[in-house]
Amino acid sequence: MEDHKTSRLAATASPLGEPLLTATGKRVVDGDAEAQLPPYRSAGASFSRTCLNLTNAVSGIGVLTMPYAVSRGGWLSLALFALVGAVCYYTGTLIARCMRADGSVATYPDVGQLAFGAAGRRTVAVFMYVELYLVAISFLVLEGDNLDKLFPGASVELPAGYQLRGKQLFIVLAGAVVLPTTWLKNLGVLAYVSALGLVASAALTASLVWAGVSESGFRGSGNVLNLAGLPTSLGLYFVCFTGHAVFPTIYSSMKNSKQFSQVLLFSSVLCSLNYGLTAVLGYLIYGDDVQSQVTLNLPSGRVYTKIAIVMTLVNPLTKYALLVAPITSAIEERFSLAGSGPARVAVSTAVLVSTVAVASMVPFFGFLMSFIGSLLSVMATVFFPCLCYLKIYKAKGLRRVEVAAIVAILLLGAFVAVTGTYSSLLDIIGTF
């Protein structure tokens, strides 16, 4: 039975399943969108190192939207934030159980194939590619908004009388900065630098404390509950915990994979505390005036504002190449361009230019993040783990309580996917 499963996992022969070279130089399966993400496949990571890796994978730019998420849903929506955190932790453990069902499973698309065959692999891979592409766009929007805050009024005259100014100027500049990193085959150095994202999150929280104490004070008000804004809040909360794509890779890297649940619990609690503290501080200070990125509310010219913005900008710049690498690799494989240096440069440049173009036209960072969370993150954190687990283990028998819990989680995911996607799309359309 084990040999049969292993051969089934190795049998895929499509553009989403051709072998690629990873940062470690080993051959892997190219539908694995996380295969080009930070290379956690060391020779057995310790408990503490895995905690750092997993926390870095989960922690991200979602922290910037937390005060805005609370402003949309009200203070009571924080209870839903805790629920989302618990759900994402549980579905993370389901992924680990799916991996224990077959020793050959090493990536998230592998889990999809183990459960649903080649169609499962393709479905997981496609959703991951789309999510990675949109997150890359949101990174550039983040860079443009915050650099415009740091250097207001900047502009550059171009030939033919065209002028780049403000946010669009800095999006183009951010794209120019990260462009050379997208040409690299070995992204290991960037993976370690991206750990600065943890420092950036701590610096942001410290800056909010500084702002509240020395400048703005605390308003101590705000909506208790806003039902109309709950779908947006839930979508943004799911963004905060979207790291499931790399969970299988981290699981495989551990010296003792049986400790994965404890590592996941530690990382989830740590990130939740940081997210929650940022949400409470940001909403207490700025109330319903809080913007989609709380750094945009910090007063200009202050030292803590500059520290918060600079540290916040480091994370997207270092992770952009890690996000788009699976996309460019899939394109290379699709058109039989793998192994060609000039082709890699051309494809990577084309992908970056496309994200810069879209980011320059997107004035709604919060709405975009809500859309990503409501549709794509919910698929990765709720639907795929639950459905794959039920399919893989149904023959072995599952407890009724467990099945009932998974069905309830799927219903929650369906609610967020439908209402959150609809609400975020309406918000996006309304900005034009």
Image (cartoon, grey):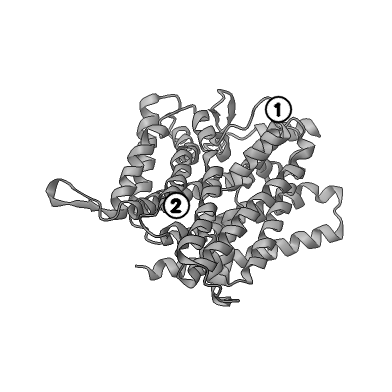
Describe residue 18's horizontal placement relative to residue 360 as left or right: right
- Image quarter for residue 264? top right
Q: What residue lies at 59% left-to-right and 43% top-to-bottom?
A: 57
Residue 304 tag number = 2
Tell me which amino acid carries mark 1: Gly
Q: Which residue is mark 1?
A: 44
Q: Residue extending furthest front? A: 214
Which part of the image, by quadrant, shows the C terminus? bottom left
Q: Against 198, is 64 above or below? A: below
Q: Position of residue 189 (x, y in %)?
A: 50, 29
Q: Position of residue 11 (x, y in %)?
A: 65, 33
Q: Residue at x 56, y 35 (%)?
A: 38
Circle 2 crowding by C-alpha within 10 Å: few under 14, some 14–19, many from 20: many
Residue 413, above or below 306: below
- In this figure, what is the number of numbered marks? 2
Q: Nearer the viewer, residue 317 or 273?
A: 273
Q: Is residue 134 or residue 45 the one in the foreground?
A: 45
Sooner in the amino-acid sequence: mark 2 or mark 1: 1
Locate residue 48 relative to residue 201 in the image: left or right.
right
